[in-house]
């Protein structure tokens, strides 16, 4: 997401753009109820991903979303190819977007991608979800980005 073109960044940076009209105060307030609710809403994951990108820690969200897409792959051939790519990008030590997982999870994935199933990244995905929920999510709720977006949405509703 290019920061110059991202509506989220423009709203939160200088108010030069309005949020989508179907982004409601209720949805934005719902994000503060739980990380699960944030991830289940229409705009929550995109706004949270933009926040993580600003924090230079978006690899967890990218991995989580890539796993969600990976689980839907029906073709064995496509799954093998995609599993290797996910490994090279996120799992392999010193990979470009290496995620923080324990060695036993990493080793299990190394074994599983020889014959990848739809669930071979599940454990790593759970670990990453937990990191996001416990670490960056509380910071997101206190962030200027979230607070400014909430105020913008509330003032748009009142005008």
Image: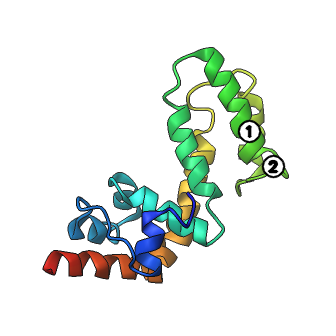
Alpha carbons under labels 2 and 1: distance apart: 8 Å
Q: Is residue 147 above or below residue 101?
A: below
Q: Secondary structure at mark 1?
A: helix
Number of other residues with Cα within 10 Å of mark 2, as a class: few under 14, some 14 to 19, many 20 or more: few
Q: Quadrant of the N terminus?
A: bottom right
In this rendering, the count of numbered labels is 2
Q: Residue at x 39, y 76 (%)?
A: 16
Q: Is residue 149 above or below residue 96?
A: below
- 58 horizontally vs 142: left or right: right
Camera-side residue of 22 and 60 = 22
Q: Which residue is mark 1?
A: 87
Q: Is residue 88 above or below residue 139?
A: above
Q: Are marks 2 and 1 in contact (CB under 8 Å)?
A: yes
Which circle marks residue 95 in the picture? Answer: 2
Name the image quarter holding residue 113. Answer: top right
Camera-side residue of 74 and 118 = 74
Which circle marks residue 98 in the picture? Answer: none
Number of other residues with Cα within 10 Å of mark 1, as a class: few under 14, some 14 to 19, many 20 or more: some
Q: Secondary structure at mark 2?
A: loop
**Place of residue 119 in the rendered image (x, y in percent of width and height, measured from the top left):** 56, 32
Q: Residue at x 56, y 33 (%)?
A: 70
Query: Does residue 102 appear anywhere in the picture?
Result: yes
Identify the residue at the far left of this view: 158
Name the image quarter holding residue 32. Answer: bottom left
Identify the residue at the far right of this view: 94
Q: Residue at x 32, y 70 (%)?
A: 18
Name the image quarter holding residue 12. Answer: bottom left
**Place of residue 61 in the rendered image (x, y in percent of width and height, measured from the top left):** 56, 55
Q: Residue at x 74, y 44 (%)?
A: 89
Q: Quadrant of the C terminus?
A: bottom left
**Place of residue 14 in the rendered image (x, y in percent of width and height, measured from the top left):** 44, 81
């Amino acid at each position: 997401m290019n920061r110059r073109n991202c509506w989220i960044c423009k709203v939160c940076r200088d108010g030069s753009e309005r949020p989508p009209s179907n982004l409601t105060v209720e949805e934005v307030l719902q994000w503060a109820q739980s990380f699960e609710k944030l991830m289940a809403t229409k705009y929550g994951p995109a706004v949270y991903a933009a926040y993580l990108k600003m924090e230079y820690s978006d690899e967890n969200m990218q991995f989580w979303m890539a796993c969600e897409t990976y689980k839907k792959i029906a073709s064995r051939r496509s799954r093998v190819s995609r599993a290797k790519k996910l490994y090279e990008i996120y799992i392999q030590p010193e990979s470009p977007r290496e995620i923080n997982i324990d060695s036993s999870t990493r080793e299990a994935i190394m074994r599983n991608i020889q014959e990848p199933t739809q669930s071979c990244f599940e454990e790593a995905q759970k670990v990453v979800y937990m990191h996001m929920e416990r670490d960056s999510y509380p910071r997101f709720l206190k962030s200027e980005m979230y607070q400014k977006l909430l105020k913008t949405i509330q003032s748009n509703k009142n005008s």
